Image (cartoon, rainbow, N blue to C red):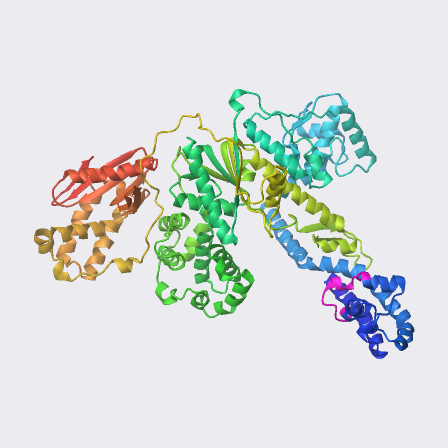
Amino acid sequence: SRLEETFFALKEKIKKAGKEGYELFQEEGVEQAWVYQGRSGIYGYFSKIAALKQSKDVLPNSYVRTTIGEDKWYSGKCPPEQKPVIDSIKDKLVQKYETIQAMAHRYLMYGLLHRKIYDVALIKEIRQLFDDYAADNQKVHISEFNKKISETISGQPVPFIYERLGRKYTHFLIDEFQDTSILQWQNFLPLIEESLAYGRFNMLVGDAKQAIYRFRNGEVELFANLPELYPKAVTPGEKTTEQLLKSQYKEVVLESNYRSDREIVAFNNRFFEAVKQGMSEKIKKVYDHHTQLLPEKEDKSGGFVRIDLLEAEDAANYREKRLQQILANVRQLQDKAYRKKDICILTNQNKYAVEIASFLIANGYAIVSSESLLLKNAPEVRMIIAFLRLLLQQDDHVQLAAFIRNLLLVYPKHGSFHDVYSRSLPLMKKSVEAMLNDLGYGNVKENEMNGMSAYELTEYAMEKFFGSSNNNVFVHYFLDFVLENQHNGDGSLDAFLSHWDKKSDKAFIAMPEGKDAVRIMTIHKAKGLKFESVIVDFIPRNDTITKKEYWTDLDLPELKELKAGMYPVVKELNDVGLGHIYDEEADKTELDLLNMVYVAFTRPVSALFIVSHRKGKKQNKFTAYIDAFLRSENVSPDAETWELGQLRMLKTKKDDEEANAEELKDMRSSSWKDLVTIARVDDVTWERMSVKKARTYGNLVHKMLSEITYAADVAPVVASYEVSGLLDAAEADKLRIKLEKLVQHNELRAYFTEGVQVRNESELVKKDAAGATFQRPDRVVIAGDELVLLDYKTGAREEEHKRQITGYAALFDALGYRNIKKLLVYINDDVEVVTV
C-alpha cells in the first residue's frame, strides 16, 4: 500500500541519518565512554537509530536533549585532548539529530497507522461483501437506520419530518437516556426543540451510573453534560439549540431507593464515596449524586452485605476457591430460608456464568440461565465441535485455532496459545492423530474412528479428552443432542455439523418449567431487575482500555488519497500529540467498569455477597476498588471477610422440600463394542432360553429392546443378532414376531412412534445419607407434556416390580415432571401391559 511504502521509505531515511551520525564518532575515533552519558546519551542514540529496531527509538531521552539543548557533550572520562575532536563534529551531529527529529513525528504517526493497515483493508473487504449481499437481497442492516434517518432529516424543517411521520407528537419522554447514542440524540433533537419552542413538557430519564452499553454506542457524556450539547456545540444552529435546552432545563435527582434494604443502601453509599476519590473529575461528576436516602420503613430496616477476600496462588487455585465460596454462600442463604429462586449470581462475562452453572449443577443445584445453559458456550462442547470439523478437513487452520483455544480454557497447563498453535500447525499436515499425540492424547487413534457415526465420534472424543466418567453436564447434553440429530440430512458427519450450525443458538440444557432454581446471569442482563439476594462474582478483563481502535479523518500531505485511518489506542499516541485519545478511552473504560459494579451492587433486596481476590502484586481494578473501600472502613489488611448488618431468616414462605433426588450429572461412557460380546450359540438356544435359562432369555430380550428406539428398528435389530450367531433363523423369527407384537400393542404403539423423545436405559443418580445409588429405567418416553416409564419383565408378576417403577417415577417427580405414566410390560407367550 501507499502508506506502507511511505512508512518504510521514511524509516530508511531516518536509519541513514542515524548511521551517518554514528559513523562520525567512529571516523574520529571517539569512544562511547568519552561522550556525555555514554550508551544512554547521544552516542547510544545514534547507534540505536542506525538499527531502528523499535519505532520509539527515534524519541530522544533527557540525556540526549540535554546534550543538544545545553551543549553538554563530554563525560567525566573524556581525555582533554579528545574534547576538540568532539567539538569538531558536534555541529554535524546536531544537524543529523535535527534531520531525524524533522521526520520523527511523521514516522511515528505512519507507524501507528501502519499497525492497523491490514485491519482496515480487511474491514473494507468485509464491508464490500456486506454491501453486495444487502443490495442483492434488498436488505438493510438495523445499524444503518439511524444514519439514514439523519441523512434524511438533516437540514429539513420540523414540519417536513411530521409530514413524513404522518402524525405529530407534542411531548417526548426518552428513557434510559444514558445509553442513547450520539446519532440517536441528534435525530430526536429537532423534534424536542420544536416541542420546547412551544413551551411543552419533555422528559429525559436515566442514570449515568448505570451506563453499561458503550459497546452498543451508548454515550454517557450526552447525559452527564446536560443541558449542554455533546459533542460541544460549534455551529450557530447547535448553539441556538443548546441555549433553548438551557432555558427550559430542570434537573430532578431521585434520592429514594425503593428496592434495597437499609444496610445495602448504606453500603453502596459508603463504597462508591470511597472509590470515587481516586477517580478523574469526569467520573466524579457522574457520581456526584450517588448517595441515596436510607429507607425509613420498618420492612426495609434490615439488609446484609458480606465481602469474601480469597487468597490464591494462581488462576486455577482462585477458580476453585471462588466456586467453593459461591457454593458456601448459596448454602448460607438456604439456611436462612432463601429458596433457590431467591438467589441470583451475577458475573461480568459469559464464560464465568458457564463455569458457575456447571459447578452448581455438579453439586445438585437446578439453575436458570439463558447464557450459561447454552451448550455452545461451554469450551468442552466447542472443543469437541472443532475436533469433529478437523476430522473432516485437517488443513482448516481456523478450526485448529478453535480447538486449541478451547483446550486451553479446559486445561490451561498445556501452555500459551501461541506456543501450542505453532507446535500443532506443522503436525496437522501429517494427521490429527500426530497433533493430538503431541498434546498428550496418544490414546486417540484415527483407525479406531473409521466408520464411526457422529454420535460414536462424539462419545469417543468425550472419553479421550475428558475421561470415561466425567460429570460435565454440557458434554452429556451435547451427546444427547447428537443422538437426537445425527440422522439429519444424509446422516453424515458433515450434515450433522451443518445442522448444529443452524440449531446451536437454541440448544440449551433443559430445566423443567417452574423449577425452584438458582439464577445465573451477566450484569448486562440483570440491569433494571431486582433479586432477593445477589452473589457478585466479578472478574474484570486485564485490558486498560475497552476500545482498541480509533477511527479518524486524515489529511496527510504525503498521502492525499488516504482520507481516513485507524489508530491503535495505545500509550504511544502521546508521542504524536494524540495522547488525549488514549487518556479519554482509559477514562471511559474505568467508568464502564465502575458502572458495571454499581449495577451489580444495587440489584439485591435483602442480601449482597461479594467474592473478591485479596489485594496482591497483580491486583485488578475490582480488587483495587474493594481495597479502597476497606481502607476507608479501617479494616485490617489481614481480614478475610467484612460484613455489614445481619443475615436474617427470610419471611417468604418456603416451598415444600423436594424429594431426595439428583439431576443426571454423571454418566459413565465407554464404547458399545466393549459392552457387547458374542455369546456362544449353545448358551442361548431357544430351548435353553424358554425352558432352562429364563434369566438368559430375559437378559437377551432386555438387550434387544434397549437397541430399539422406534418400531422400525425391530427388524434390523433382530437381524443383527441372527447375523452375529446369537440366534438361528427359527429363533430370530419367533423373537421378531414377539417384539413386533410389543411395539404394535394398542397401549404401547404411541410410545414407539417416530417423533417422541426416547431414552433407553439412561442412568439416574440418587444420593442420600448412605451414598450414591444408580437406577436405570428400561425406557423413558416424553410425548408432549407426558413422561412415560416402561419397565420390561419376563416371568410372573411381583409386587416388587410395582415398587421399582414407582421409585423411578419419584425420581422424575423430584426433577419437576408431574404428568407421569407408569407401565409394566410383561413379555411371555403374550405381551401384557399393567398400568401402575
For the N terminus, the image quarter is bottom right
Q: Quadrant of residue 49?
A: bottom right
Q: Position of residue 484 (x, y in %)?
A: 36, 48
Using the rendered image of the protein, determine whether residue 55 is visible from the camera's viewpoint: yes
Q: Position of residue 377 (x, y in %)?
A: 48, 48
Residue at 55% over, 20% down: 297
Left/right placement of residue 725 relative to residue 552 reads left
Left/right placement of residue 457 relative to residue 821 reads right
For the C terminus, the image quarter is top left
Q: Position of residue 420 (x, y in %)?
A: 52, 64
Q: Quadrant of residue 432?
A: bottom left
Left/right placement of residue 589 relative to residue 227 reads left
Left/right placement of residue 703 relative to residue 521 reads left
Residue at 79% over, 59% down: 559
Residue at 44% over, 36% down: 332
Q: What predominant SS class does the magenta segment belong to?
A: helix
* Residue 50 belongs to magenta span: yes
Q: Nearer the viewer, residue 284 or 351?
A: 284
* Residue 619 belongs to magenta span: no
Using the rendered image of the protein, determine whether residue 340 is visible from the camera's viewpoint: no
Residue 777 vs 260, above or below: the answer is below
Residue at 70% over, 27% down: 162
Q: Nearer the viewer, residue 644 or 196?
A: 644
Segment tinted magenta in the rendering: 48-62
Q: How many marks?
A: 0
Q: Position of residue 580 (x, y in %)?
A: 75, 48
Residue 732 vs 172, above or below: the answer is below
